[in-house]
Image (tube, helix red, strand yellow):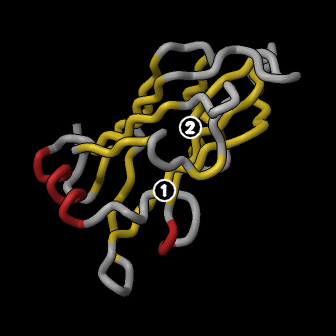
Amino acid sequence: MQKKADELTIEVVCTDLPGIRFAEYDPVYLGIQKAADVVEAVPGDTKRVVFRPVFRIGKQADGSPNFLGPFAQGTPQQRFFYLSWGVMHQDRRFEMFRRAKIHLSHLRWEQIQKAMSQGTPLRATLKLTGKKGDPLCASVKSPNIEWKL
């Protein structure tokens, strides 16, 4: 549920994770980047994981939405957040080896305001195994991501 009128939760539903091993990486984990840290990491063979980052929503000079807060990455004009793949060491230290970039700049005020007024998150559903069976990385595009209110 929403915390404040100026905040938007994005429910990030991750499916089709590629597994616990990839090349020389073992054990593979997936987490979400919050500022410079990766948090909420889960094993890469998890069937389904849901992250719920919260963004403050401001306005850019041109009136378009500006996603703010510790999950927001990039410039105000090209905001995104990262899902990070890495190895989880025995001491619980996460060592990243690749990231998936989830773009936000295509989201419009109508979608954002509807979600905030209803107190419901926007949902992004992602398939996280690449064409070669590897952990999906780089900018995630259709058909690997679907957005819904």
Look at the image and tell me whether residue 70 can be seen. Answer: no
> Between tags 1 and 2, which lies in front?
1
Query: Which residue: 75% across, 21% down?
Result: 88
Query: Which residue: 59% across, 52% down?
Result: 139
SS for tag 1? strand
Query: Which residue: 38% across, 53% down?
Result: 55
* Residue identified by numbered label 2: 32
Numbered label tally: 2
Would residue 20 be found to the left or right of residue 111 on screen? right
**In which quadrant of the rendered image does the N terminus lie?**
top left
Location of residue 129 by image quarter? top right
SS for tag 2? strand
Q: Position of residue 101 (x, y in %)?
A: 58, 50
* Residue identified by numbered label 1: 103
- The 10 Å Cα crowd at callout 1, few under 14, some 14 to 19, many 20 or more, is some
Outermost residue on the front side: it is: 131
